Amino acid sequence: MIYRRTLRREVACTGIGLHSGKPVRLRLLPAPAEHGVRFARTDVGVEIPATLAHIGGQDHATTLSHGGVSIGTVEHLLAALSGLGVDDVRVEVDGPEVPVLDGSAAPFVILLHEAGLRPLAVPRRLLRVLAPVEVRHGAKGVRLVPSEHFEVAYSIGFDHPLLRHQALSLRLTPRTFTEAIAPARTFGFLREVEMLRRSGLALGGSLENAVVIGETGVLNNKLRFEDEFVRHKILDAVGDLALLGLPLLGRLEATRAGHALHAAVAQKLLATPGACEIVAPERAPVVAVHARDPESPLESPAYSLSTS
Ligand SMILES: [Zn+2]
């Protein structure tokens, strides 16, 4: 039997927000079983659960919002929590963004190791994919298919000599996440960064927290992995899929996708009758999932899907 897990003790760090460029204090606190992952904006006194129903925006990063208050750039922290198997935690932030730190999930992994993990007296349930679901937008696409493990197969391709094609497929465990995925940093193209700056975004962005790709190469000294870019896309996908609210038993196959498609396929999984079920680790079905059933333990999608 696998039990839900929370933190052993409270931990905190301070860093700047990628878009605001302002300092933010982040605290991670132990929480009771079934609390889930919840953000608390302590500066305005609003709590925002980390679920698909609270997605407020997905332009360049994932933002959650509730009652007109939002918290931005949540995906790297969510990836670290999901990657290490933390089910219940309270995340306090005193500003509108999670600190970007080095642009990867590695500092959050270190923070979680510092906190230590503690099992709770409630068995963990998983969300198992039973039938494939797919969302496509032209050359971009995402699919969730059944698997006995949580796996991600990702491929990217950009119109840039450095990034024509990268692909990676792996099974996510706390170990593979920590070693192969967590250290991969956010990346952006120099021309895009300049555009974001002009519109008052990415003000906190620098070579300290992102890999910046210029016309002829990477502006940073060196990459952490030769294929750091596709690894970061897997990191983002793990963070976005964490918004399902339960660990996933299935395989994500993504081509040139991003935050919006990751969330769209997760929404579609919940909204498609018979596409998934909630299981205890022994695989015995516990509850059938009907996304629009108010009794469903998972929240119903609050925004409509645009699929093609
Ligand atoms: Zn990212």
Image (cartoon, rainbow, N blue to C red):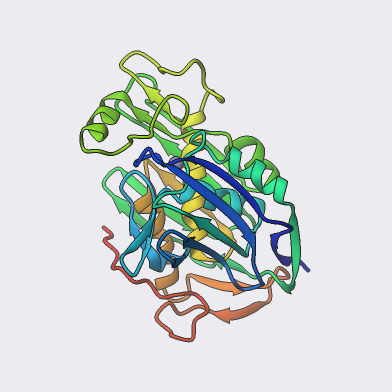
The percent coordinates of residue 296 (x first, y second) are 49, 81
Q: Is residue 156 visible?
A: yes
Frontmost residue, 260 versus 279: 260
Q: Is residue 134 visible?
A: no
- In this rendering, the answer to whether 29 lies above or below 218 is below
Frontmost residue, 216 versus 107: 107
- Left or right: 50 in relation to 198: right
The percent coordinates of residue 129 (x first, y second) are 54, 65
- Left or right: 243 in relation to 151: left
Quarter of the image where the N terminus is located: bottom right
- Left or right: 40 in relation to 194: right
Residue at the image point whose x is 66% and y is 36% from the top = 179
Q: Splitting the image into 4 quarters, where does residue 64 fall?
A: bottom left
- Left or right: 286 in relation to 21: right
Q: If the picture is divided into quarters, which one holds ligand 1?
A: top left
Residue located farthest toward the right when viewing the structure as drawn:
1
Frontmost residue, 103 versus 175: 103
The percent coordinates of residue 2 (x first, y second) are 75, 66
Residue at the image point whose x is 44% and y is 66% from the top = 45
Quarter of the image where the C terminus is located: bottom left
Residue located farthest toward the top when viewing the structure as drawn:
216
Residue at the image point whose x is 68% and y is 72% from the top = 280
Q: Splitting the image into 4 quarters, where does residue 180 fall?
A: top right
